[in-house]
Image (spheres, rainbow, N blue to C red):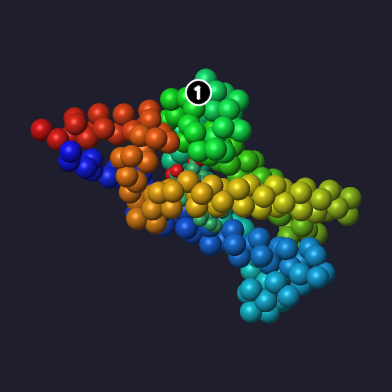
Amino acid sequence: MRKEKPIQRYNALERINHWIVAFCFMLAAISGLGFFFPSFNWLMNIFGTPQLARILHPFVGVVMFVAFLRMFQRYWRHNLINRDDILWAKNIHRVTLKEEFGDTGRYNFGQKMVFWLAIFSLLLLLASGVVIWRPYFADAFSIPMIRIALLVHSVSAMVLILTIMIHVYAAFWVKGTITAMVEGWVSAAWAKKHHPRWYREQRQKQQEEEP
Ligand code: HEM
């Protein structure tokens, strides 16, 4: 039997966009943990010196936010929750045993949760980050306001870090997923197993394009 052709999942621009977000995230998360925990102060050296880390961390955060907005614009429609997601979520204990549930589209419920948690925590990080950003904006806010912003910034950073840890674990755990974001393609078997509705949509599109 002839092997089915691989299916494109992300084009080059989408992949570059995603890796800019991921790279900025690593820099911002590592330097941020360096500011937060005295025992991790050495992590600030990711930018060369602690002083540079202090200056560059907020700018890197803004780049991450802007780059993520492009991803948000591209994928929000595919991340809307539907009835099949509820079935998937209800059977999460069996999903961890590598079974699949529901007629999953481009993204499954777990991926959708990562998507919404990422945009939610990034919005909070941006808003609270502006309030605490010295020397540019912090002077415009009262001390109690800055204290609240510091708390919001730390909690939302923890939420984003934990979310991305799960995201990265899942990306490596589900065999064949990493190639989607590195090379842009997935195998037909991968698509059929994990995203059956998306697989059918892609095949139909291919058939319409091919005479
Ligand atoms: C740091 C290492 C990272 C790795 C190894 C990684 C890996 C991947 C892979 C393999 C995919 C494709 C999954 C698929 O199409 O089924 C993906 C998609 C995605 N990634 Fe990442 N990623 C990383 C960091 C991040 C970060 C920091 C963010 C956001 C702050 C992020 C947000 C997303 C989003 C939104 C998608 C599309 C899935 C969706 O919309 O639900 N990733 N990632």
Work out whether residue 14 can be spotted: no
Tell me the residue at 38%/28% (across/down): 197
> Residue 44: percent from the left, percent from the top?
70, 72
Please tell me in which quadrant of the rendered image residue 36 appears.
Answer: bottom right
In the rendered structure, the answer to whether residue 47 lies left or right of residue 149 reads: left
Tell me the residue at 40%/49% (across/down): 176
Number of dots carrying numbers? 1
> Residue 122: percent from the left, percent from the top?
63, 47
**Furthest-left residue in view?**
211
Residue type for callout 1: Asp
Query: Residue at label 1?
Result: 84
How packed mark 1 is, by other alpha carbons closer than 10 Å (few <14, some 14-19, many 20 or more), is: some
User: As displayed, is residue 201 above or below residue 59?
Assistant: above
Quadrant that contains the N terminus: top left
> Residue 131: percent from the left, percent from the top?
75, 53
In the rendered structure, the answer to whether residue 153 lies left or right of residue 17 reads: right
Could you say which is closer to the camera, residue 87 or residue 107?
A: 87
Tell me the residue at 76%/49% (across/down): 155
Could you say which is closer to the camera, residue 61 or residue 177?
A: 177
Quadrant that contains the C terminus: top left
> Residue 66: percent from the left, percent from the top?
54, 52
Please tell me in which quadrant of the rendered image residue 27 appears.
Answer: bottom right
